[in-house]
Amino acid sequence: MKNLTAFTTKISFIILIGCFLMSFNRGTNGVRFQDLNFKEAEHQAQYRKKPMFMFISSPTCLQSQRMEENFKNKEISGLLNKNFFCNRYNTDNTLNLLRAQSSWGVRSYPTYIFFTEDGKIISKEEGYKSQAQTLEMVQNAINKVQELNATKGTVANK
């Protein structure tokens, strides 16, 4: 029995260290995307009190695959991870595809949508973006969020 307890303790320790190392390395590999449906992603954004960035793509889309490289850029990933709850929404099944088309007017891939904490669209763009264009798109979304927050503060103070 002692051997089993010692073995279980060692295995638990190894798993704990592995989880720690994975979470430590996770931030250096780019944008920390979640792969949730919209309702779950919206709930997480509200819980974390962050606006949401939704990367809508298709696994078969070459431009979406190219964008994944941009999301590994330190400056881009740093801004997105700091300022947004980031979610990747794959349209690889019919339900997701219909939702993207009907709810957000997605016509092509990749599509980038920035939402407020309560699920309202801040901005939407489509197509492949260079790193400079991606950085500009993210900074513009951050600026819009700041403007909205300033407006909320002004309205609340009246």
Image: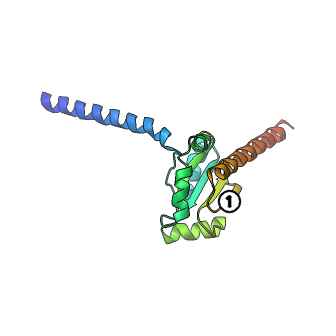
- Say what amino acid the circle numbered 1 marks: Glu
Q: Nearer the viewer, residue 83 or 125?
A: 125
Quadrant for the N terminus in the image = top left
Q: Residues within 10 Å of mark 1 (few under 14, many from 20)?
A: some
Q: Is residue 11 left or right of residue 34?
A: left
Tell me residue 45's x, y (percent). Answer: 59, 47
Side of 74 relative to 16 (left or right): right
Q: Classify mark 1: helix, strand or loop.
A: strand
For this view, does 99 lie left or right of residue 12? right
Is 118 rendered above or below residue 58?
above
The percent coordinates of residue 15 (x first, y second) are 30, 36
| Residue closer to the observer: 148 or 90 | 90
69, above or below 94, in the image: above
Quadrant location of the C terminus?
top right
Q: Where is residue 141 drawn, in percent x and y?
A: 70, 48
Residue 40 visible? The answer is: no
The quarter of the picture where residue 145 lies is top right
Q: How was this image coloured?
A: rainbow
Kindly identify the residue that appears in the image at 48 percent across and 69 percent down: 93
Residue 104 on image: x %, y %: 65, 64
Along the line of sight, which residue is nearer the eye, 85 or 130? 130
As drawn, which residue projects farthest toward the right?
Answer: 158
How many marks do you count on the picture? 1
Q: Label 1: which residue?
A: 125
**Is residue 105 shown above or below 34?**
below
Q: Is residue 153 visible?
A: yes
- From the viewer's side, name the closer residue of 88 and 76: 76
